Amino acid sequence: MSLKVKLFHAIPQPIINNVLLTFPLLYRTSLIYYESNMQGDGINEIYSALDRVIKMPGQIIECGAARCGTTILIAEYLKKNNTNRKIFACDTFSGFNKDELAEEQKQGLTTAGSDAFTHNSFEYVKRKIRKFGFAGVITPVKGYFEDTLENICDNKFSFVLIDCDLQKSMSFAAERIFPSLTSGGIMLFDDYTNDTYKGAKIAVEQFISKHENEISNHGLLKRLYFVKKT
Ligand SMILES: C[S@@+](CC[C@H](N)C(=O)[O-])C[C@H]1O[C@@H](n2cnc3c(N)ncnc32)[C@H](O)[C@@H]1O
């Protein structure tokens, strides 16, 4: 666990939330960085992928949004580029499915603890989205993907970010959304090279081998795994 995450866990969550919402300029500091998990190569790769789909029709979806830091960065980027898209931010907003996590721990696929991503709440994320003025743009969707994606996959997506760490959830989300990805649309996966979440690489490789004929281009960038639909 990084020092930043340890500090974050040591302070009661309501205090952190209220300080951030009261002094929103803090989100823009490099220490907080919007509470995004993508600082550095990750966000640059997301911006490049967005550039490639920005003129295409289709909404945006992030599976595994945590505290919606990356979601807000995406919304700001689209706004700066005068692009009007809906963004769906899907998460439990309370961490992993405990049974799935325990299973991956048992298989030696993850060393994540059971409190990973539990310092979160739906109420906080909704307040944060409002604070940034994106209530009409970002829709936070609360619950397990297995229960929620069904209701939003009648949308067409041009950009999908799969960042939910565990193999089963990654596979489920990618498979469920892929039919709704437009031709030429992009799906990015995080954690392909992350030793804390070894199931991510397995999920990506299974996905590529299953859909090879429907994919025009794929490969590992510096951080994210890139997939473009034919
Ligand atoms: C690495 S975090 C996401 C980070 C975020 N994309 C960012 O860039 O800041 C992974 C998130 O996936 C969520 N998650 C994992 N499995 C899930 C599932 N089956 N349904 C809903 N959310 C899930 C967890 O709650 C956690 O918040």
Image: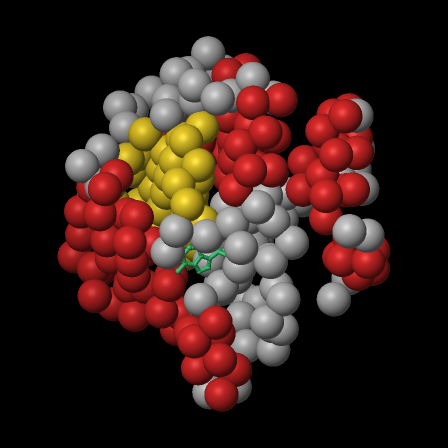
Give left or right: position of 36 versus 33: left
Height in image: 43 above or below 171? above
- Residue 106 image offset from top left, x and y in percent: 49, 88
- Residue 69 image offset from top left, x and y in percent: 60, 38
Residue 120 in view of the camera: yes
The structure residue drawn at horizontal position 37% and vertical position 63%, both measured from the top left corner, is 169
Residue 145, quarter of the rendered image: bottom left
Give left or right: position of 26 versus 79: right
Q: Quadrant of the C terminus?
A: top left
Residue 174 in view of the camera: no
The structure residue drawn at horizontal position 39% and vertical position 16%, both measured from the top left corner, is 84
The tally of labels here is 0
Front residue of 142/171: it is 142
Q: Quadrant of the N terminus?
A: bottom right
- Residue 38 image offset from top left, x and y in percent: 61, 46
The structure residue drawn at horizontal position 20% and vertical position 59%, both measured from the top left corner, is 211
Front residue of 207/27: it is 27
In this view, the residue farthest toward the top is 82
- Residue 58 image offset from top left, x and y in percent: 28, 28
Q: How is the image coloured?
A: secondary structure
The structure residue drawn at horizontal position 61% and vertical position 64%, both measured from the top left corner, is 116
Height in image: 52 above or below 152? above
Residue 59, quarter of the rendered image: top left
Give left or right: position of 19 versus 66: right
